[in-house]
Image: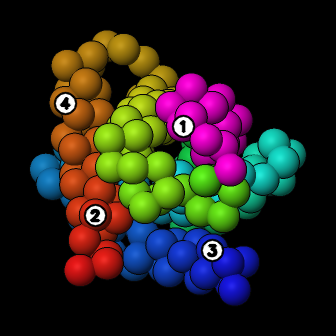
Amino acid sequence: MNIAKNILRFVVLLILQVLLFNHLNGWGLCHPYIYIMALICMPLLPRWADMLIAFALGFVMDMFCSSLGIHTAACVLIAYLRPLLLAKMVQDPERVMQDVSVDTVGLSQFVRLTVALCLLHHGVVFLMDACTLSHFWILLLRWIISCAVTLFVILGYSTFRKA
């Protein structure tokens, strides 16, 4: 059942990202990437499996966004660093073997993990997309606004899904 739930989450988030969130473009500054919630909430798997799933997720996003590997690189990076962050933030690793959520790690740890991975993902995507720091302030503004909107959606869903 847990595998089916994770596959369904993966597919639903990809569909929402491609059909809805890719078309939100608040004056060129807001690009929410909610699909990373599939990576954040995955259960702990062997590192190679995490990275393979992240590669597939990023590759599908790159196909729909025509972004030539930017999303793949960002997803593989956060999949590589996620177990390290979980080990630092969660005292009992047995709690996250099934799922990483507000229920299993607690609200404060989930928020810290989501913020860290979201900032990392968006930073990589926007830096690789820009390929320059000549417009640093616009890049920083895009990063902050996009992270804020992404975090609002992910944390809002994660916090209120049981209500």
Residue that badge 1 annotates: 90
Q: Earlier in the sequence, mark 3 or mark 4?
A: 3
Q: Earlier in the sequence, mark 3 or mark 1?
A: 3
Q: Residue at x 29, y 34 (%)?
A: 143
Tell me how far mark 3 sits from mark 1, CA to CA.
Answer: 21 Å
Question: In the image, residue 126 lies at what x, y percent?
Answer: 41, 34
Q: Amino acid at mark 1?
A: Val
Q: Earlier in the sequence, mark 4 or mark 1?
A: 1
Instruction: Judge the density around disc 1: few (<14), some (14-19), many (≥20) Cα neighbours within 10 Å.
Output: some
Q: Nearer the viewer, mark 3 or mark 1?
A: 1
Q: Amino acid at mark 3?
A: Asn
Question: In the image, residue 69 lies at what x, y percent?
Answer: 65, 45
Q: Secondary structure at mark 4?
A: helix
Q: Earlier in the sequence, mark 2 or mark 3?
A: 3
Residue 159: numbered disc: 2
Residue that badge 4 annotates: 141
Give the quadrant of residue 142. top left
**Is residue 110 in sight in this rendering?**
yes
What residue span does the magenta drawing correspond to?
75-94
Q: Amino acid at mark 4?
A: Leu
Question: In the image, residue 38 lies at what x, y percent?
Answer: 55, 62
Q: Residue at x 67, y 78 (%)?
A: 2
Q: Earlier in the sequence, mark 2 or mark 4?
A: 4
Tell me how far mark 3 sits from mark 4, CA to CA.
Answer: 33 Å
Inspect the magenta stretch and tell me whether residue 28 lies in it.
Answer: no
Q: Residue at x 61, y 81 (%)?
A: 5
Q: Mark 3 touching mark 4, by CB under 8 A?
A: no
Tell me how far mark 4 sits from mark 1, CA to CA.
Answer: 31 Å
Q: Earlier in the sequence, mark 2 or mark 1?
A: 1
Q: Is residue 156 left or right of residue 26?
A: right
Q: Nearer the viewer, mark 2 or mark 1?
A: 1
